[in-house]
Image (spheres, helix red, strand yellow):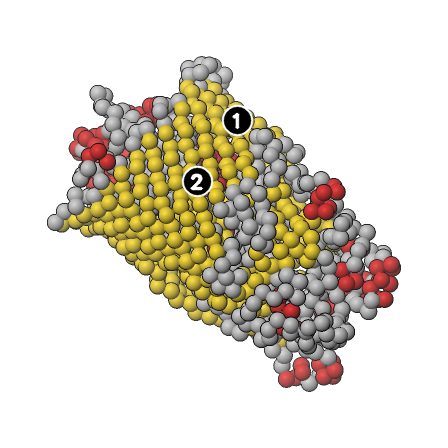
Amino acid sequence: MALYGETPRQRTLAVPGQVRKRRRYPAFIETRPGSRALLLGATALIAAAAIPALAAAQTAPVTTATPPTHHHKSTARHHAAAKPVAGAAHVVPAAAPVAAPAVATTVAANTAPPDQMESIMIRAQRRLLREQDSPSAVTEIGQTQIRMSGAAGNIVSLLRNAPSVYTYQQGIGNNEPVMSIRGTRGLEAANTLDGMPMQDLLQGGSGAFLQNIIAAPFTQDQISGVSVYPGVAYPDQSTFGTIGGTVAYHSLRPADKFGVDVYGGVGSFGTWREGFKVDSGQLDGALGRGVDAPKVMVQYDNMQTKGFIDYTPARYNSFEAALDKPYDEGQSMFQATVLYNTGSGLITPEPIPMPYLQQNGNFSNYSPDQEYFRQNNDYFTLMLKNDTYINDYINVGLSGFYRYSNSTTEEYANPALFAPNGGDTPFTVGGANPFNQTIAGFGEQGLYGYGNPAYQPGAVTYDGNAMYNNSPACPASVVAQWAAAGQTSPCGYNAYTQTLHTDTYGIQPRVSILVPEFWGIRNTIHIGGLVARETQLNTPVYYGITQPVPHDAINDVAGAPNQGGGLGGGQQRTIFSGYLQDKIDLLHNTLHITPGFTLQGTKTAYSTGYQVFGTPSAATLATPYCQANTCNYGPFGNHKWDREFLPFVNVTYDLDKIAPALKGVSFYGSAGTSALYAPTSDFSPSVIGSPPSASIVHMYEGGVKYNTSHWLFSADYYYQKVDRDFGFFQYQSGPQAGDALYTNSGQRLMRGQEVTLMWRPNSTWTFSGNFSHNSARYLKTYEASVTVQEDQFGIAQRGSHVSGIPQWLAQFSVDYNKRNLLRRGDDLNVNLTGRYTGHQYTTYDLTGFQNIGPIPGTTGGYGTYDYYNTTAGATTMDPNGGIAPFVIFNLDVNYAMPVHELGPLKKVDFDLNVQNLFNTFYWQYKYRQISPASCGTFTSNPPGTTGFAGNAVSNYGCTPQFADGLPGMPATIMFTVRASF
């Protein structure tokens, strides 16, 4: 993708008479959030005198793939770099030029004596030289791409700028975004903000399905960029729990100068946005002066939208306060960051049936009087970070963080949506019934009420029919219809509410050691670790017939303490992780070897005072009720230690010294392993057997990079094999209904190629693009979650493709940047970007009567009830059809106009952002399914089978199969005006 927003002045060092040529040391002056432009300007002047190659300017892109060892390096590297300049998403390292004003103001702003300043600059330059990086297939995405993502996007959709990343969402803003990286799921990727883990440590990358999907812990407005490390990142960049890669976001930091921005925007689908940002600038005073002066930033943003899918309104609020306090003449830095974000809205819990969309429109949805799914979420984050310069050879750092999330989910479905045995209702269209996530939606209301497995005096006595069958919200016709079928009415099981609260906190110590050079060999050692814990207490789940559901003990179906049983307990995971990494530079700094390893230990625990599938006491089992009925409620506890050793190595060779004609060319190769730990839900009392061990990915990648003043090229091949892949299955019917099976029985293989190309003939035009090819397949047959969205489980068949993974992805961009167009100092930027998404495999549901071969863990073969019960409704790859390729074009036009003689107003910025410029219709997600329903029992054995008579018909065994789809975002326009003071 092209780069934007630079001025020609920002592409050259301000050294008179200097010849423009390619900079040889791309890593030392790379832009990075929270950096100190003034110190690096002075450092660059010293470098220009000492090393001619450093003095060379470059017209190549400024925000390209950052070599992956820069985040935990010396503080001079962090805090001496120039303020980030918006740039392109590339995978080739390039030098980041220093703005001329930074050089001109450095000495004037610094109050240190000249000899002390010179000493500081020499020390900083020495450390920067030692921090030259080794490349890998990392992609950097800058502030310009954030702007081009627009208000319709989010921190996940922004990642589309990287090769091999596919994302989609069902609403405007952060509304259930879904992501895959190189064929792995978003839940399998790690997220960090300023190096601190931000993913759900209990469940995975972004949390469990249908949890915390409106809003996010941080937003696009609160970041300055993101580094995408697919596969396995360097040990000092990796974090806890990933087999898909690490997505490292960088927070937006305070500016050096005072400023106030006020903005507002209006867009399609009833979208409105307004906010402000205040920068204090350098606050000279008792806390520091010049480069040591503290800086503060405060910003707030509000957005509301009706959504492009009917009945999916949402509202988001985000707040950030940030403090930067440099010290030691700018070589050390303390940072504090506070984030508080909220989101609320309606979503569709799963794609809408095609017959309904064909009848009512591609963007139609059920009205809230029929069914709805609402979430209200809020997130708080506090981060403290300190990096201290000790001497020329040692820097130490310590980060600490605390965050919490509250997520309240409410769901409602009209009782008239349901019919016995999956029959037609007034809401049925083309044989397809609406589906929702309630107990009635799964046809499992028969488990509740007196005499049923989920009923036990002293723990859970909820009986929805007894409470609501005679209420005005439960039509008499519905009660009569279900009674005639001898089944439990859905009334009282068609609405629920639950609130989840999580707390996460931890610390990250680190040290960087620059060993003195000997025999021409340089060593840069990074040592660090992470100690963190996340907890989630068990909370009640309240069922009823209308919203809001009463939060009364009689409505609680989770065994609350006030019912005598005492749910208690909760989920908890404690993490201990440490890494050691050594970057070795050999052969006149042309051969770079970076070995390292990570050692991780985790303790996961799940406990509850009284819960279904727990262990009843002898006294409970002796009660008259339990003697006459099934009782399986009781206390439960489960815990497990996991330990993994995860090695890594990268080797890079620069051809500059041995072949001058190939200057700018580097070859590299990386190999590493990483681990993903089982979600805490795998430890619940409903699980059969022991929780699985960590899933492991083995990554091998190799590539070539070429970087000159006008051309940038990168190509790589990757091979990622997942061993001990998580398997999952839950019985939907029969005597084991509700029981779940989690295993390490699976294997997957992802491999492919990635290419990035950029040509910049002059400072006005930039042409860029990337493409990636991916093959993601299962290597074994096993029971697993088989969709990228993690919303369906079924059978992964050996040799079949992983569904929802585009085989080809491509992006191409044309960027035009013109300064002084209408008046002196203005800046016009026009960018047209096209994104191609190739064919995707989809899924369908098995009926239970197909023979797909042996299934590990199934006790009986084809024709037995166990085989039927395992495969009925199981989702698997559909060998026919799929999602057809599509191309989407986006346009962004930005005009920054300086303002003079209008009081404090300095600049007005106009931005027109258009997503899906030509209003192309496409499917983001699609599959064929059988909706669950209450189905009764088999009265006899179907032909060719045994053991069916008297057993329950699978709740996926009595409804027709139909297709569901989630359409992509139509043409969406957002116009924003920003005034800067």
Question: Is 302 located above or below residue 735 in the figure?
Answer: above
Check the image and name the residue furthest to the front. 944
Any part of residue 506 in sight: no
Label 1 belongs to which residue? 911
**First in sequence: mark 1 vs mark 2:** 2
- Using residue 969 as the reference point, say whether residue 512 is left or right of it: left
- Using residue 733 as the reference point, say whether residue 14 is left or right of it: left
Question: Is 584 located above or below residue 447 in the figure?
Answer: above
- Using residue 184 as the reference point, say whether residue 664 is left or right of it: left
The residue lying toward the viewer, choosing from 498 and 678, is: 678
* Residue at 58% in and 58% down: 876
Disc 1 packing (10 Å; few <14; some 14–19; many ≥20):
many
* Residue at 37% in and 60% down: 577
* Residue at 42% in and 52% down: 751
Q: Can you tell which quarter of the image residue 540 is in?
A: bottom right
Q: Is mark 1 on a helix, strand or loop?
A: strand
Any part of residue 650 in sight: yes
Label 2 belongs to which residue? 771
Q: Measuring from the top left, give residue 311's x and y in whole percent.
A: 70, 43
